[in-house]
């Protein structure tokens, strides 16, 4: 009987502690990584209660705000990882633990498996618009360059767990293999990051993708940036700032995007996912009268690592990064502004440029430019 009373008392105390932490938060909690839409209880009519809609909003709010949520989520995830080598299945992009501690996001594996291959006519329509834009900009003495950034799954497929590979589908062409001949046939200027990284891998270059990250590594992005500057010089016909590596630093602690998936795993001992990372110690090579172009970049999160090098070494006079064509980051300074498409000033955005770079990752070849290409063509009268 005494043991039963102690158990009930401890249970009540635990519930009270959770309630106090939920509403007053007197104690610190572990921070969870990732982005989620904040929920809040809402009711607009009595029917919301009868239909259960109000109860659903309360449940969603409680899941996000319950006391010690960070400790609870990370403890649960850690147990799942330690016992079953798996991460939470509730994560929107689902993290997969591959061989040799290589982490993947499931959408990249799905893309490698050719689960969503676009119709050739849709790909060709995109390429035709790219060519039209390239020609329209050329008349204004502005160059256009499409950069294709690689997927970790296509560069390191050997680390994907066998149960996640659809071998029958691999016989089909993927979106990249459909796109490349079209770009060549239409004469669109492009830089092929997938071919580049496969070449790096064959040459034995290590760490071009980090084990704990979904994006290319800072080291891989540095190698890409060197090739990008060479291509920009070829299009512009001018000597630009070069970036040179004085030495390569080895680290057991990853920087920024090199640990993006590991953070999203939200386990207690994230460092157990880290391996070895390479970071170039770079210097600026800028002779007198070197050309610093005015650049506009339109693309995804794969741009951040090479923008880091372009910005650090002041390779441009001015640069805007249209992140998913929703947010504008102005450099130098990384001033952030929302892009208001209804009142967008296309003359100011496009006319002063020397070069416009459109980045497209392998996983998103069906939405190159995120609406920028067609909107720009419409705005400049094509």
Image: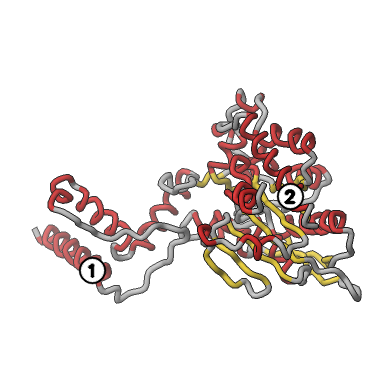
Helix, strand or loop status at disc 2: helix
The residue sitting at 68% across, 60% down in the picture is 350
Residue 2 disc label = none
- Residue 73 at x, y percent in the picture: 38, 57
Q: Earlier in the sequence, mark 1 or mark 2?
A: 1
The residue sitting at 74% across, 63% down in the picture is 353
Q: Is residue 35 visible?
A: yes
Residue closest to the eye, 53 or 353 = 353
Q: Relative to 174, is 288 above or below?
A: below
- Residue 343 at x, y percent in the picture: 52, 62
How far, Cα to Cα, is label 1 from label 2? Answer: 65 Å
- Residue 336 at x, y percent in the picture: 56, 69
- Residue 1 at x, y percent in the picture: 8, 58
Task: Answer left or right for 356 relative to 53.
Answer: right
Task: Answer left or right for 114 relative to 293.
Answer: left
Task: Answer left or right for 203 relative to 377.
Answer: right
Helix, strand or loop status at disc 1: helix
Q: Is residue 244 visible?
A: no
Q: Residue furthest left?
A: 1
Report which quarter residue 15 is drawn in.
Answer: bottom left
The residue sitting at 46% across, 43% down in the picture is 84
**Residue pointed to by mark 1:** 17
Residue closest to the eye, 134 or 168 = 134
**Residue pointed to by mark 2:** 136
Q: Nearer the viewer, mark 1 or mark 2?
A: 2
Graded by Cα atoms within 10 Å as few (under 14), some (14 to 19) or many (20 or more), the crowding at tag 2 reads some
Graded by Cα atoms within 10 Å as few (under 14), some (14 to 19) or many (20 or more), the crowding at tag 1 reads some
The residue sitting at 65% across, 50% down in the picture is 381
Report which quarter residue 115 is drawn in.
Answer: top right
């Amino acid at each position: 009987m005494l043991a039963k009373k102690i158990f009930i008392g401890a249970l009540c105390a635990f519930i009270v502690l959770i309630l106090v932490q939920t509403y007053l938060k007197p104690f610190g909690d572990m921070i969870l990584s990732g982005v989620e839409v904040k929920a809040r209880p809402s009711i607009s009519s009595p029917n919301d209660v009868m239909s259960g809609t109000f109860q659903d909003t309360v449940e969603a709010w409680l899941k996000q705000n319950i006391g010690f949520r960070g400790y609870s989520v990370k403890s649960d995830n850690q147990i799942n990882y330690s016992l079953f080598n798996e991460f939470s299945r509730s994560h929107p992009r689902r993290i997969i633990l591959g061989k040799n501690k290589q982490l993947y996001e499931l959408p990249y594996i799905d893309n490698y498996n050719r689960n969503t291959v676009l119709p050739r006519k849709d790909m060709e329509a995109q390429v035709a618009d790219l060519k039209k834009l390239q020609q329209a900009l050329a008349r204004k003495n502005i160059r256009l360059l499409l950069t294709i950034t690689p997927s970790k799954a296509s560069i390191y497929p050997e680390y994907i767990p066998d149960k996640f590979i659809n071998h029958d589908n691999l016989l089909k062409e993927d979106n990249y293999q459909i796109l490349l001949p079209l770009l060549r046939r239409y004469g669109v200027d492009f830089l092929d990051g997938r071919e580049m990284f496969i070449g790096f891998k064959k040459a034995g270059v290590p760490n071009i993708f980090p084990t704990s990250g979904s994006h290319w590594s800072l080291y891989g992005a540095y190698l890409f940036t060197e090739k990008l500057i060479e291509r920009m010089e070829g299009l512009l016909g001018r000597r630009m700032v070069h970036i040179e590596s004085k030495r390569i630093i080895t680290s057991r602690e990853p920087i920024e995007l090199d640990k993006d998936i590991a953070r999203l795993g939200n386990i207690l001992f994230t460092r157990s996912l880290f391996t070895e990372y390479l970071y170039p110690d770079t210097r600026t090579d800028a002779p007198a009268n070197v050309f610093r172009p005015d650049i506009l970049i339109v693309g995804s999160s794969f741009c951040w690592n090479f923008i880091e090098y372009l910005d650090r070494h002041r390779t441009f006079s001015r640069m805007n990064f249209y992140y998913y064509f929703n947010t504008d980051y102005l450099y130098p300074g990384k001033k952030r502004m929302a892009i208001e498409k209804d009142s967008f000033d296309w003359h100011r955005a496009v006319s002063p440029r020397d070069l416009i770079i459109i980045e497209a990752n392998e996983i998103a070849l069906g939405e190159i430019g995120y609406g920028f290409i067609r909107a720009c063509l419409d705005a400049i009268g094509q």
